[in-house]
Image (tube, helix red, strand yellow):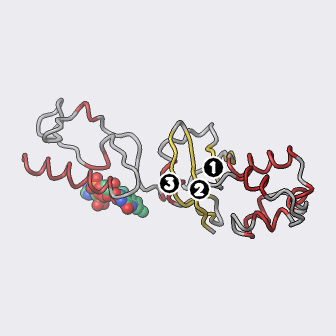
Amino acid sequence: MSLDATVSAAKHSFRENILFTHRGLSGPAILQISNYWKKSEPISINLTAGKDVTALIQQNRGRSQKTANFLAELLPQRFIEQFVDDGLSNKPLNGLSDRDIERLATNLSDWRVKFSVTEGWDRAEVTLGGVSTKELSSQTMESKKVPGLYFIGEVIDVTGWLGGYNFQWAWASGHAAGSSI
Ligand SMILES: Cc1cc2nc3c(=O)[nH]c(=O)nc-3n(C[C@H](O)[C@H](O)[C@H](O)COP(=O)(O)OP(=O)(O)OC[C@H]3O[C@@H](n4cnc5c(N)ncnc54)[C@H](O)[C@@H]3O)c2cc1C
């Protein structure tokens, strides 16, 4: 199942799809935010990107519709069944207290997820870190310390977002080095 969401960590946010897999969370938004994720800190996921859930519930508060059915108009039903606790999802909209609404809105707009493990090196797409750009000529990629030694691409401390930037960097730095040899 995938959902349009805004994920945030360390003052960076991405609005893309998140994907629920049988192993955990993945998808473009999760891959993007992994560049900024610190193991000890949670990321925040807004599952109602672009929608004000509090305002939507308030507008419909007079209705006797079950909360789960109302939320299923905003998010997939299967997700709501798993995510919202039965105590709240079974209540009718006109039975929700202000505190219930606040709890629902917070859970859906600021879901804090603390990851314990990643898929690891074998499944990683890019690396953070590497040979410092300060140690290299930006014209030729040649080491400043060891003449004749060149570094290009992934092995340098340059990491791009999704969107082809890492390929672009590998090709551009390779071209720069190749042209100077
Ligand atoms: C699954 C996946 C998906 C990706 N998707 C994207 C994407 O959509 N867009 C994007 O921009 N980037 C993407 N990337 C990142 C991108 O592939 C890398 O940033 C880029 O390939 C780095 O190029 P490179 O030439 O520096 O290194 P590499 O492509 O890793 O090339 C290094 C080469 O050196 C060879 N090698 C290693 N050791 C030795 C040795 N001792 N002797 C001889 N040869 C050796 C390796 O076999 C390899 O062929 C993805 C990466 C993965 C893993």
Residue 22 placed where, x, y %? 65, 66
Q: Is residue 106 above or below residue 47?
A: above
Q: CA distance from mark 1 to mark 3?
A: 13 Å
Looking at the picture, which amino acid does disc 1 mark? Answer: Ile
Left or right? Give the position of 91 relative to 58: right
Q: Which residue is mark 1?
A: 45
Which badge, 3 or 2, is on the more N-terminal residue?
A: 2
State the residue in front, 108 or 97.
97
Mark 3: which secondary structure?
Answer: helix
Residue occupying image coordinates x 74% and y 70%? 77
Quick check: which quadrant has ligand 1?
bottom left
Q: Quadrant of the N terminus?
A: bottom right
Residue 165 spot, x, y in % from top left: 32, 53
Do the numbered discs 3 and 2 sit on residues whose CB atoms are within 8 Å?
no
- Label 3 sits on residue: 31
Compare marks 1 and 3 and give the one earlier in the sequence. 3
Q: Amino acid at mark 2?
A: Ala
Look at mark 2 in the image and give the residue it sits on. Answer: 5
- Tell me what residue is drawn at x 74 percent, y 67 percent: 72
- Residue 42, image quadrant: top right
Displayed quadrant of residue 141:
top left
Give the crowd class for mark 1: few <14, some 14-19, many >=20 residues within 10 Å: many
Tell me how far mark 1 sits from mark 2, CA to CA. Answer: 7 Å
